[in-house]
Image (cartoon, rainbow, N blue to C red):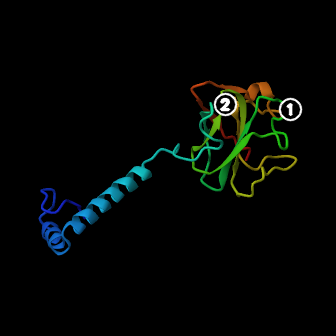
Amino acid sequence: MRLGLAGGGDQSPVHAPFVRGMASLFGNRFVSLKFHLLALATLSSAVAAAPAWAIDCAGAPGAGNVKLEVSATNVRNGAGEVAFTLYPDDRSRFLARGGKLLRVRAPASAPVTRACFWVRPGHYAVATYHDENGDHNFNRTLLSIKEGFGFSNDAPTTLGLPAFAAVRFPVPAGGAAITVKTRYSR
């Protein structure tokens, strides 16, 4: 159904009698209702077309913080969630229990899932994993890794975990956007 203002020229011949009839029954209330319905339809389409960055960021804006946007690419499906973990510029805290600064768990979206953080300019490291079963655990066995994972700077993981120097990256005063490639071993 097309929405137009009562008496306006944008109505189809089929809808014009309906609009005029409703306007005569309800007067300006109908015009107001049509305006609100049109505004709601416009807002709904804008929200549906909003970029994936329209999500809440971990941390708090202000106080010198800038936005760090992280995209996990190569996510193979929309099952579960992708965990984005941000580490400080301290090699002893990287991947250590209790070492994280912030974590975002975003619903998985293939092929790219996004998250963001409010941080002070400086150096950081990011680790991600695709928690396909949503159990909040990075599932692995002694011989294989069962879920997709990645590190900042696309750091290599051929024979174990990457060195901290390989995952460390700068966040300048203007903020940053980085990409983390998700890898699957199976």
Q: Residue, x 24% and y 68% (percent of image)?
A: 29
Classify residue 55 as left or right of residue 102. left
Q: Residue, x 74% and y 44% (percent of image)?
A: 185
> Badge 1, how many Cα within 10 Å: few under 14, some, many 20+?
few
Which is nearer the eye, 153 or 57? 57
Residue receiving disc 1: 92
Residue type at mark 1: give it. Answer: Ser
Estimate the spatial distance between the alpha carbons at disc 1 and disc 2, rounded to whole Å: 20 Å
Position in image of residue 53 (x %, y %): 53, 43
Q: Secondary structure at mark 2?
A: loop
Position in image of residue 143 (x %, y %): 85, 46
Q: Residue, x 22% and y 64% (percent of image)?
A: 31
Q: Is residue 73 visible?
A: no
Query: Mark number for residue 120?
Result: 2
Q: Residue, x 57% and y 45% (percent of image)?
A: 111
Residue that protrudes farthest toward the bottom in the picture? 25
Residue type at mark 2: give it. Answer: Arg
Classify residue 35 as left or right of residue 49. left
Residue that protrudes farthest toward the front in the picture? 63
Classify residue 158 as left or right of residue 170. right
Badge nearest the viewer, 1 or 2: 2
Position in image of residue 170 (x %, y %): 67, 25
Q: Which comes before the other along the chain, label 1 or label 2? A: 1
Q: Secondary structure at mark 1?
A: loop
- Which quadrant holds residue 11? bottom left
Position in image of residue 165 (x %, y %): 78, 24
Looking at the image, residue 80 lies above or below residue 102 = below
Which is nearer the eye, 20 or 148? 20
- Which quadrant holds residue 157? top right
Q: Is residue 148 visible?
A: yes
Query: Mark number for residue 165?
Result: none
